[in-house]
Amino acid sequence: MNKIRWGVLSTAKIGLQSVIPALQKGEFSEVTAIASRSLPKAEVAALSLGIAKAYGSYDELLADPEVDAIYNPLPNNMHLDWNLKVMEAGKHLLCEKPLGLSVDEVEEMILTRDKYGVKAGEAFMTKSHPQWAETRERIHRGEIGNPCLVQGAFTYYNVDPRNIRNMPTMGGGGMWDIGCYCITMARFVFEEEPKRLVASLEMDKEFGTDRLGSVIMDFPTGQAHFGVSTQAALFQRMQILGDKGHLEVRIPFTPPIDQPTHIDQDNGNYLPQGITRHEYATVNQYTLMGDDFSRAIMEDKEVPVTLEDALNNTRVLTAVYRSAETGQWVDV
Ligand SMILES: NC(=O)c1ccc[n+]([C@@H]2O[C@H](COP(=O)([O-])OP(=O)(O)OC[C@H]3O[C@@H](n4cnc5c(N)ncnc54)[C@H](OP(=O)(O)O)[C@@H]3O)[C@@H](O)[C@H]2O)c1
């Protein structure tokens, strides 16, 4: 098998605009089928993206013996049911973030993965970008000393009442949508799990979803804090402070696929002449993620972001919502 044959569950925007074109550029991935609740929608998508087969139901896609793996970008509240069906159909599964909306959901997915012996993972493409592997290597080499504080921000402006992010019944809300990135990358940097956290969330009165949020997390060897908003100007940044220096990942989560990205490093002398800028060649992190996942299937290796990792992220996310109810510290 030279390439994994991917099927796509729905005509979600993220699939059409980013992930399908990226998979199509992969060395080990190809997209052979797409399904929608509406056959015409699937046909239009298939035609415009050069996908061979279009299905008018998700079940037909899962029944296709010429599909090896499914990419699932359904709304968050539909991940559980369809992930279980995908794995029960014997297909490998790459599901969008956040994988599940509760610890129980993710545990059920883990049991199902093990029962059906398929590969399954969460689509945190951010972790496939070389800028993060190198950030970790710089920390391992001691370039900033011991990391003690991670801080992050991720914001965008979206007040469309028809957008799934603004619908509580669809698993909407800023923490589920983008807080998950700040949490997973703080865990990636410390290489350990937070013990406790405190969170504050501001809810949108019309939508009933969290539109502004801040979290402080206590890790065994340091602290992380971050803020997210679905109603602030587009911005993202992550900083790692150590006792000898500082790394700033300028576009940490969705770096452009058509221009290089940067990390700034300093040794505590935060003047322009004290800062070294590291440039990363232009890459498409969705292509890298797809190929990493396809190779995990072909070579029977661990997938890039495992369900166990997703379970730990879900523990933190659910703790954020628990803490926000009372404003008190909670154990993760
Ligand atoms: N990794 C990333 O960079 C990234 C970026 C954006 C979003 N995401 C994740 O990807 C997922 C999809 O996000 P999106 O913004 O692309 O979603 P979207 O454009 O709203 O698409 C969701 C799709 O789900 C299908 N669907 C089935 N039942 C539905 C229902 N009751 N209501 C609405 N849609 C329904 C629809 O496809 P059909 O009509 O074809 O069936 C729809 O096009 C989410 O989990 C999100 O967190 C990830």
Image (spheres, rainbow, N blue to C red):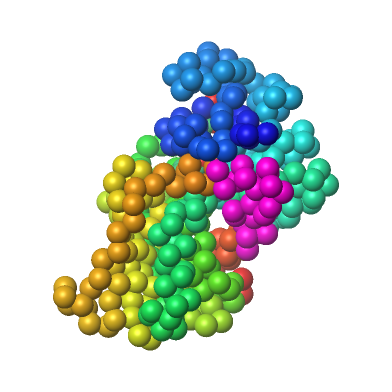
Q: Residue 162 at x, y = what percent?
A: 43, 33
User: Percent x, y for residue 200?
Assistant: 44, 66
Residue farthest to the right, as pictured: 115
Query: Is 238 contained in the magenta span?
Result: no
Residue 303 lies, with reference to residue 24, above or below; the image says below
From this viewpoint, which residue is outermost toward the front? 2
Name the residue rendered at 29%, 81% in the picture. Answer: 267
Q: State which quarter of the image contains the C terminus.
A: bottom right
Quarter of the image for residue 90 reads top right
Location of the N terminus (image quadrant): top right
Query: Residue at 51% of width from left, 74% of height from top?
Result: 190
User: Magenta residues: mostly which secondary structure?
Assistant: helix
Which region is colored magenta?
Answer: 291-312
- From this viewpoint, which residue is outermost toward the bottom? 243
- Count of marks placed on residues: 0
Image quadrant in which you'd find residue 52 = top right
Nearer to me, 304 or 2: 2
Instruction: Please say if 93 is above or below 223.
Output: above
Pick the residue in front: 156 or 135.
Answer: 135
For the residue pair 24 and 99, the one nearer the viewer reads as 24
Q: Position of residue 111 (x, y in %)?
A: 79, 51
> Is residue 148 toward the left or the right of residue 83 in the image?
left
Identify the residue at image location x=65%, y=21%.
Answer: 57
Q: Quadrant of residue 17?
A: top left
269 lies left or right of 147: left
From where the camera sits, is residue 120 visible?
A: no
- For the point 30% across and 59% down, which residue is it? 279
Q: Is residue 304 visible?
A: yes
Query: In screen coordinates, is 60 left or right of 131?
Result: right
Q: Is residue 308 magenta?
A: yes
The percent position of residue 41, horizontal first and vertical second, equals 51, 18
